[in-house]
Amino acid sequence: MCTLTIIRVGDALTLTMNRDDAPMRAEAPPRLWDDGACRFAAPVDLEADGTWIGVNAAGVAACLLNRYDEAPKGVRSRGEVVPAALDKGDFGSATAAVEDLVHRDYAPFTCLVVSDEGAMRIDWTGARCSTRELHQRTPWMMTSSSWRFEAVTAWRQALFEDLCGRSPSSHGALSEFHCAIREGEEAWAPMMRRENAHTKSITQIILRPEHAELRYWTRDDSLERGLDDATHTIRLARA
């Protein structure tokens, strides 16, 4: 359960992602992962020691959303998928790394690999894997939900178009969308809360020609100040 937006304004490409999970599932702020072939920045899921979003020094970002197709649970953590992509460096190699995984080892997922070169979406349904190119020129949103998926998607898409569709360059509109919490509609909003899950954090990646920046907010901090004054920030010079 997560919500992701991608907006391009001038030479800046901004990915923003709400992570939704069980309240007791621990996570840690972003750190530098430099024990592989390519250095990257990403927050950490402490239960599986993986991550759901990150960016490397080559200016490649990757993020993962759970799917809820009927399929085996998988014997490996989906938190391995993003590191597998970012460890490969360039956009083409990162995409190929996800396509070449032994997918049957994982529960269903959607992985997006994004850079200045383009954006690719890789879907593993538990039965088949498919890849398709996405267009970055217009603002777009995608989400996942284990509860009333189609209705939740439609609700969030309508809110996104209302806030960000007409003014994609507005930092305030993007902040309002990702931090949206509606009284009586907490199960539907991007800053969601349900009986067994809630939005735990927001991570934002900004890709520019000279550097990539990862910003991270805890739930409480984002509710207090929106997408300003990040709790943690890591900047990587573009290699």
Image: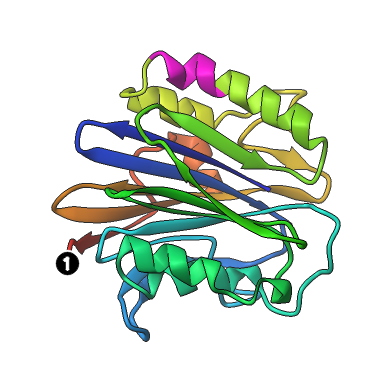
Q: Residues within 10 Å of mark 1 (few under 14, many from 20)?
A: few
Instruction: Please tell me which residue lies in front, 46 or 76.
Output: 76
Occupied quadrant, residue 135: top left
| 196 horizontally vs 181: left or right | right
Which residue shows up at 64% across the image and 77% down it?
102
Residue 42 seen anywhere in this rendered image of the structure: no
Q: Is residue 225 visible?
A: yes
Q: Residue at x 42, y 28 (%)?
A: 139
Q: Vertical placement of 192 versus 57: above or below?
A: above
The answer to whether 169 appears left or right of 218 in the picture is left
Q: Amino acid at mark 1?
A: Ala
Whether residue 238 sits left or right of residue 92 in the image: it is left
Q: Which residues are magenta?
A: 160-166
Residue 163 magenta = yes
Give the quadrant of the C terminus. bottom left
Which residue position holds label 1?
A: 239
Is residue 131 left or right of 74 when viewed as pictured?
left
- Residue 22: image x %, image y %? 74, 57
Residue 43 screen position, x and y as percent: 47, 64
Q: Nearer the viewer, residue 10 or 25?
A: 10
The vertical placement of 3 against 41, above or below, is: above
Q: Is residue 144 magenta?
A: no
Instruction: Please tell me whether mark 1 sits on a helix, a strand or a loop.
Output: loop
Residue 136, given in percent of the width and then of the height, sits at: 38, 36
Where is residue 234? Give x, y as percent.
29, 61
Residue drawn at x 48%, y 41% as measured from the top left: 222
Residue at horizontal 86 percent and vertical 56 percent from the top: 70
**Would you place residue 167 above or below residue 2 in this image?**
above
